[in-house]
């Protein structure tokens, strides 16, 4: 009887802490918070650049299969229903396409294809909430994700290719990564300081790949 009672208590404790974990809020924005809670519960993926991109050419940039030296070395991908979040966690890696940012949100349009969702990319006090079902997307910015590979438009004219694998992040790591979605302006400030101190660590060179 004591053994059975002990198991019941242990079960209730597990349920209690599980509920607390999954019911926590990350953002004051209602719809964004639902997405982030979904990101927290579901699998995360780490995608690494495979030194291959497709370029449609821009000004004097080459057309065809290229190596984009300015591509993000790795991207963390979160997924919840028809929305994925792509985030580059390494210090100094930021994008200035459509505003300075550390992450992007994408809405599925069909199969493994997603299009960029416009957001304010600021903190809760400075940003409007979003509704992925109703919001328009930037159709010129596309990404393709099937959990094993990621093809992401880092610019409207270039798509970078990544190889992906599932990562078992700890709850603590997930919380820290998701915090970038909410308070990315804090992280961007740190990134700019790092880039100013290490200007030679970043390149925008794009080389055409030989057959």
Image (tube, rainbow, N blue to C red):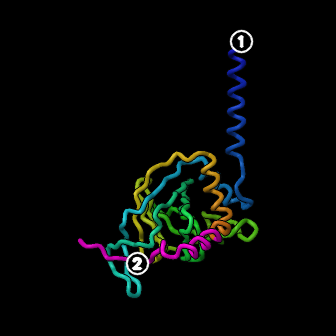
In the current view of this chain or complex, which residue is farthest to the top? 1
Q: Residue at x 68, y 67 (%)?
A: 186
Question: Which comes sooner in the sequence, label 2 or label 1?
Answer: 1
Q: Which residue is mark 1?
A: 1
Q: Quadrant of the N terminus?
A: top right
Q: Nearer the viewer, residue 74 or 6?
A: 74
Rendered view: 54 above or below 39:
below
Q: Nearer the viewer, residue 211 or 34?
A: 211
Q: CA distance from mark 2 to mark 1?
A: 71 Å
Q: Position of residue 48 (x, y in %)?
A: 43, 59
Residue 33 in the figure: left or right of residue 103:
right
Q: Position of residue 101 (x, y in %)?
A: 59, 71
Q: Residue at x 54, y 59 (%)?
A: 84
Helix, strand or loop for disc 2:
loop
Q: Quadrant of the C terminus?
A: bottom left
Q: Which residue is mark 2?
A: 205
Q: Nearer the viewer, residue 171 or 29?
A: 171
- The range drawn in magenta is 189-211
Q: Is residue 10 magenta?
A: no
Q: Nearer the viewer, residue 196 or 107?
A: 196
Q: Is residue 194 magenta?
A: yes
Helix, strand or loop for disc 1:
loop
- Residue 82 in which image quadrant: bottom right
Q: Residue at x 49, y 64 (%)?
A: 114
- Residue 170 in which image quadrant: top right
Rendered view: 13 above or below 196:
above
- Residue 203 in which image quadrant: bottom left
In the current view of this chain or complex, which residue is farthest to the left? 211
Q: Residues within 10 Å of mark 1 (few under 14, many from 20)?
A: few
Q: Position of residue 29 (x, y in %)?
A: 72, 61
């Amino acid at each position: 009887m004591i053994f059975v009672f002990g198991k019941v208590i242990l079960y209730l404790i597990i349920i209690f802490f599980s509920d607390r974990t999954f019911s926590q809020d990350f953002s004051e924005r209602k719809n964004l918070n639902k997405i982030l809670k979904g990101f927290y519960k579901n699998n995360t993926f780490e995608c690494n650049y495979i030194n291959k991109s497709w370029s449609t050419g821009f000004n004097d940039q080459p057309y065809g299969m290229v190596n984009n030296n300015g591509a993000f070395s790795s991207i963390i991908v979160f997924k919840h229903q028809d929305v994925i979040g792509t985030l580059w966690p390494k210090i100094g890696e930021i994008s200035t396409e459509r505003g300075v940012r550390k992450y992007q949100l994408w809405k599925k349009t069909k199969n493994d294809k997603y299009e960029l969702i416009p957001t304010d990319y600021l903190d809760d006090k400075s940003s409007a909430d979003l509704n992925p079902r109703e919001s328009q997307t930037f159709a010129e910015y596309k990404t393709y994700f099937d959990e094993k590979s990621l093809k992401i438009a880092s610019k409207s004219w270039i798509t970078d290719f990544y190889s992906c694998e599932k990562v078992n992040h700890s709850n603590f790591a997930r919380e820290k990564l998701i915090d970038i979605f909410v308070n990315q302006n804090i992280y961007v400030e740190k990134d700019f300081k790092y880039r100013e101190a290490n200007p030679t660590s970043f390149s925008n060179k794009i080389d055409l790949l030989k057959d």
